[in-house]
Amino acid sequence: MSSTTAPAPPPHRPGLRAAWGALDHRQRRVVAAVALVLVTLALPWYSEESVTQRGPGSIVRTGSSLSGLAGMSFIEAGLLVVLAGVLALMWGRGAGRRFVLPYPDGTLVCAAGTWMGLLIVYRLFARPHGESSAQEHTLIGLNWGIFVSLLAVGVLFAAGFDLRRHGPRNPVPGEPGPVPPERYPDVDPATIVVGPRPDEQPTAVVPSSSPSPPPPTSPPGEQPTTVVPAPRPDDEPTHEWPSRMPRPPRTPRPQPPDERR
């Protein structure tokens, strides 16, 4: 009689809805900020104006707009890669993936927002080049969509900063968070009993058997004497001056003899 082993069930892979439900409200803000940045990439970033010369004295101007994804370059590709990385991080946290990163999630989201902001600022000055020929010239200018994208990146940075301040370092759904520090209970100082330390030998105070000698008294009729300690060698000499010096006696001034006599 042969025994058969049942095959192991395939690992459970939570869907997007389950991963979204496992995230807290700060992580959901990060995902919403990433979606906002993705939407702003489809807004008009540039204004394109074509100037065509069809004959002597005949010039035709046509204008259009270009989205951020229309002029695809390494700048826009870098933005998409960073956004995909933040989404993968949040999906891993929601799906319960056990991985530890060298920095907290909020710090990584803030770094991603800073890098994307620098890329968009670079695009403000390095715009795509238009085509030019003998009869047609294309001019590329900025449009309002690129400024909205820069604002959306600021929202993503703020969401990451809030996650860095209040979120755990490497959260895993289903595991308890960090234990708060234990507070000492309020104790009345009058009820505290101070005892010897573990490494200290107990000491006992034994009263002396011989009575202490009485203080010396002066005989009747004599003034009590005050014992003044002798000055030490390292003490500086002090001089006590009376509060008011006595005046010397005045001597009468001699009168000159009278010469008329």
Image (cartoon, helix red, strand yellow):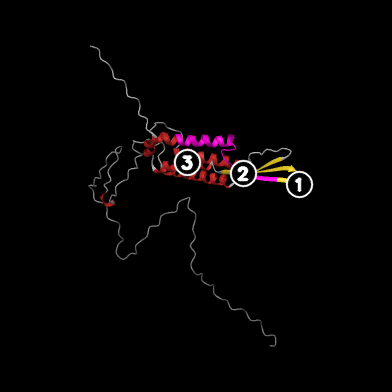
Q: Above or below — where is 220 with respect to 14? A: below
The segment highlighted magenta reads: 60-88
Find residue 17 and report its image quarter.
Answer: top left
Q: Position of residue 151 (x, y in %)?
A: 53, 46
Q: Above or below — where is 102 with respect to 191? A: above
The answer for how far apart the CA atoms under marks 3 and 1 are is: 49 Å
* Label whose residue precedes the other's in the sequence (3 or 2): 3
Instruction: Identify the element where label 3 is drawn.
Output: helix
Disc assigned to residue 64: 2
Q: Position of residue 1 (x, y in %)?
A: 22, 11
Disc assigned to residue 57: 1
* Label whose residue precedes the other's in the sequence (3 or 1): 3
Disc assigned to residue 35: 3
Q: Above or below — where is 232 with respect to 177? A: below
Looking at the rendered structure, the kind of residue marked 1 is Gly
- Most foreground residue, 147 or 143: 143
